[in-house]
Amino acid sequence: MSFPRVRRPWRLAAEAAAVLTAAVVAFPLYWMVLSAVKPAGEVQSEDPRPWTSQPSLDAFRRVFGQQDFARYFLNSLLVAGTVVMVSAVVAFLAATAVTRFRFRFRTTLLVMFLVAQMVPVEALTIPLFFLLRDAGQTVPGIGLNTLGSLILPHIAFSLPFAIWMLRGFVRAVPEALEEAAYLDGAGRSRFLWQILFPLVFPGLVATSVFSFISTWNDFLFAKSFIVSATENSTLPMALLVFFKDEGNDWGGIMAASTVMTVPVLVFFVLVQRRLVSGLGGAVKD
């Protein structure tokens, strides 16, 4: 005779805490979507309700009716995609170099990566503004009012974290595997891209998620470095259209925010399996 398994109290408490935490985290997203589909009268109501009986898509029509919204969306995809790909490749090569090779000031370099993460972005915005302004006079494409002025700073800020995190994944690959590959006739380049790269790919996915989110949601750099060329603005700048002197269009703001969230959710769905294994490897290290 078999008896049903009884869950331990601590496990029930842990599951209840997990459900409560998930509900707290998901509630702002629910309220954002709800406000986006509410009629204007309900959004501005002094008695807000966590539901609506008359959903409307008028806010989304106003968002997609903006003249430059599609251009802003494509600019955000281009900037975020470029930052993710370039930072992933460079971080992989740099992490391999600082892990597999011994050279002078290697430890100092790793400490500098950590120090770079401690500097607030706001403290570097003004120096970066003048640097990009002067660089644009000699190197076209990276000065102010260009997409390059957004891509380069985000790559620079993404690399320290990505390199430091990928070190653990590269270190976890046994050196005996590298030696066996060389004995079988594989060169350094073949080992790097055909053997090592697939093994550390979960770590690349994990670091790419952070790079994508920080770049996609960036407002500070987009506001500071795109001064006059509004055609090169990114999606967060589209939210400013709905802030008006006579009254903010909260329905439009929430609808635009919902549209901004969709690519992030799609990116998570595409990489979720690799992301879980990548974060697990990082914790293990």
Image (cartoon, rainbow, N blue to C red):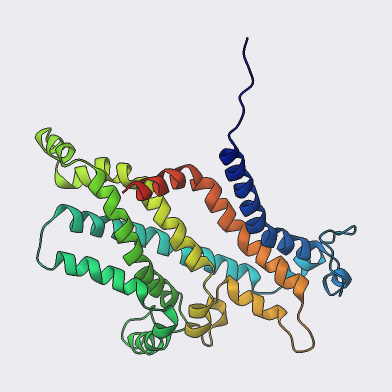
Residue 39 left/right relative to 61: right
Dividing the picture into quadrants, the one containing residue 263 is bottom right
Task: Name the residue nearer the viewer: 61 or 96.
Answer: 96
Give residue 56's position: percent from left, percent from top. Answer: 84, 61
Q: Quadrant of the N terminus?
A: top right
Give residue 177's position: percent from left, percent from top. Answer: 18, 37
Task: Name the residue nearer the viewer: 212 or 100.
Answer: 100
Residue 192 left/right relative to 88: left
Q: Residue furthest top?
A: 1
Residue 81 appears in the rendering: no
- Residue at 41% across, 75% down: 148
Give residue 285's position: percent from left, percent from top. Answer: 31, 49
- Residue at 87% across, 71% down: 47
Residue 230 left/right relative to 126: right
Look at the picture and state if 86 lies above or below 62.
Answer: above
Look at the picture and state if 150 lies above or below 246.
Answer: above
- Residue at 86% across, 75% down: 46
Look at the picture and state if 148 lies above or below 89.
Answer: below
Look at the picture and state if 44 lies above or below 179.
Answer: below
Task: Name the residue nearer the viewer: 258 or 15.
Answer: 15
Residue 50 appears in the rendering: yes
- Residue at 36% across, 50% down: 282
What is the number of callouts on the image? 0
Residue 81 left/right relative to 49: left
Q: Residue furthest front?
A: 9
Give residue 17's position: percent from left, percent from top. Answer: 61, 49
